[in-house]
Image: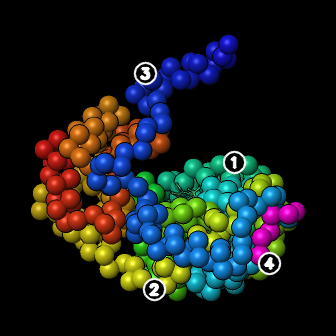
């Protein structure tokens, strides 16, 4: 027995060529799909220093045993959060179990009934879900458009009830790889006394000194109310943190349900996040990755593919190929040649905006990049 409405929804997905299935991880293909931009997930030295650290502290536990407000607030949390607030130049840092948890925890608890959330049209699903769980009113502005944001801020300037206005964007968009004008947005928020929130999931480890992200790189820390940094992408492990004031941390500990009602991270996870940040501090993170990004962009131009690509200087590069069937076919062709490139289908992205997503890494070679783009060119 299975509810008919659910069965119908699955059938519709199938008919639209959009049925999601879990594939077996493919390790034999050259990686142009993972978020492991710096290769940290496979770093032997991070693995070893995590193990050594746990051993040196005599931490021999497998799990947290409870939520952070009960038995799960391991002493490592204090060490890690102190490291994070220094590294990211923030007054306070609060670790969540994942970026998804951090975003739903923030947006479901911070904006109050009657408040207003202005969000970029392409904002990540975790932020949308958080907004839906809040009682605030939400309005989207056009992707990366300061003008569109400004029009909304003007519209709500003298809204009744004196609502708090929150503005949220990503510093690197996960499905486009592009970046908004954070400086102008931050100043606009200041002018309108709006609270600016930036999700830095795909900027951490990629931009800024030692990979500290774009907010710090642009010296915007004091103009940003909250930053969400995640550790499952360039940091190669898992978890996330919300960076902001001590008052914000205190508020989240008291009201953020995805923080309160869940088992804390295992000590091993905390030690890995700690070790990954130690590795960031010692690495010239960006040089290798940014050489590959520059080379990729140069090759896109040389092969005359630039009109199909969304402009990006991040590790994420997308070639728009309309239609689920067509983009899947292109991805399959390139995969058969040995390159792991993923098709991003609608409804994950809007219809006709389906795309091939190329994620670049420190460990991709120039030859890999040329080959994968030549394969794409042949297909197009
Ligand atoms: C912009 C953005 N925010 C948040 C998340 C969620 O982070 P996590 O994978 O740690 O749950 C993602 C991951 O896909 C993301 O791309």
Q: Are marks 4 and 1 in contact (CB under 8 Å)?
A: no
Q: Residue at x 80, y 58 (%)?
A: 65
Foreground label between 1 and 2: 2
Q: Quadrant of ligand 1?
A: bottom right
Q: Residue at x 54, y 54 (%)?
A: 124
**Is the CB of the residue bearing disc 2 within 8 angstroms of ligand 1?**
no
Determine which residue is flagged by label 2. Answer: 282
Give the mark, 2 or 4, whose residue is nearer the N terminus: 4
Please tell me whether residue 359 belongs to the stretch shown in magenta: no
Placement of 275 over or under 71, stated as above or below: below
Determine which residue is flagged by label 4. Answer: 247
Q: Are marks 3 and 1 in contact (CB under 8 Å)?
A: no
Give the mark, 4 or 1, whose residue is nearer the N terminus: 1
The location of residue 293, given as percent across then percent down, is 28, 69
Q: Are marks 2 and 4 in contact (CB under 8 Å)?
A: no
The location of residue 356, given as percent across then percent down, is 32, 47
Residue range (magenta): 70-75
Q: Are marks 1 and 2 in contact (CB under 8 Å)?
A: no
Give the mark, 1 or 2, whose residue is nearer the N terminus: 1
Placement of 148 over or under 352, stated as above or below: below
Question: Could you give the CA–CA distance between mark 2 and mark 3, rounded to whole angstroms?
Answer: 50 Å
> Which quadrant would residue 253 be assigned to in this image?
bottom right
Question: Could you give the CA–CA distance between mark 2 and mark 4, rounded to whole angstroms?
Answer: 31 Å
Determine which residue is flagged by label 3. Answer: 15
Which numbered tag is attached to residue 132?
1
The location of residue 88, given as percent across then percent down, is 58, 81
């Amino acid at each position: 027995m299975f509810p008919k409405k659910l069965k119908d929804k699955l059938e519709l997905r199938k008919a639209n060529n959009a049925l999601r299935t879990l594939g077996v991880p493919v390790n034999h293909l050259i990686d142009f799909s993972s978020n492991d931009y710096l290769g940290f997930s496979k770093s032997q030295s991070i693995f070893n220093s995590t193990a050594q650290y746990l051993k040196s502290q005599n931490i021999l536990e497998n799990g947290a045993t409870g939520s952070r407000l009960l038995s799960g607030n391991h002493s490592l949390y204090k060490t890690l959060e102190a490291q994070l607030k220094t590294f990211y130049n923030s007054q306070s840092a609060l670790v969540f179990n994942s970026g998804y948890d951090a975003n739903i925890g923030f947006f479901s608890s911070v904006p109050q009934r009657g408040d207003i959330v202005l969000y970029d049209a392409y904002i990540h699903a975790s932020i949308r879900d958080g907004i839906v769980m809040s009682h605030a009113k939400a309005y989207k502005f056009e992707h990366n458009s300061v003008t569109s944001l400004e029009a909304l801020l003007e519209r709500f300037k003298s809204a009744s009830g004196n609502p708090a206005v929150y503005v949220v964007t990503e510093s690197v968009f996960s499905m486009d790889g592009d970046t908004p004008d954070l400086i102008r947005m931050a100043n606009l928020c200041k002018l309108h006394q709006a609270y600016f929130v930036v999700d830095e999931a795909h900027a951490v480890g990629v931009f800024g000194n030692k990979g500290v992200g774009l907010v710090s790189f642009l010296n915007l820390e004091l103009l940003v109310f909250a930053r969400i940094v995640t550790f499952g992408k360039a940091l190669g492990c898992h978890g996330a943190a919300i960076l902001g004031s001590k008052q914000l941390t205190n508020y989240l500990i008291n009201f953020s349900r995805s923080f309160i009602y869940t088992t804390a991270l295992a000590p091993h996870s905390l030690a890995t996040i700690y070790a990954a940040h130690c590795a960031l501090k010692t690495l010239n993170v960006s040089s290798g990755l940014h050489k590959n990004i520059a080379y990729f962009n140069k090759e896109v131009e040389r092969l005359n593919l630039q009109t199909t690509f969304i402009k990006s200087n991040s590790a994420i590069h997308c070639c728009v190929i309309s239609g689920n069937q067509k983009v899947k076919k292109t991805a399959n062709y390139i995969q058969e040649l040995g390159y792991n490139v993923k098709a991003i289908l609608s409804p994950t992205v809007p219809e006709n905006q389906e795309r091939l997503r190329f994620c670049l890494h420190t460990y991709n070679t120039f030859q890999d990049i040329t080959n994968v783009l030549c394969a794409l060119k042949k297909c197009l």
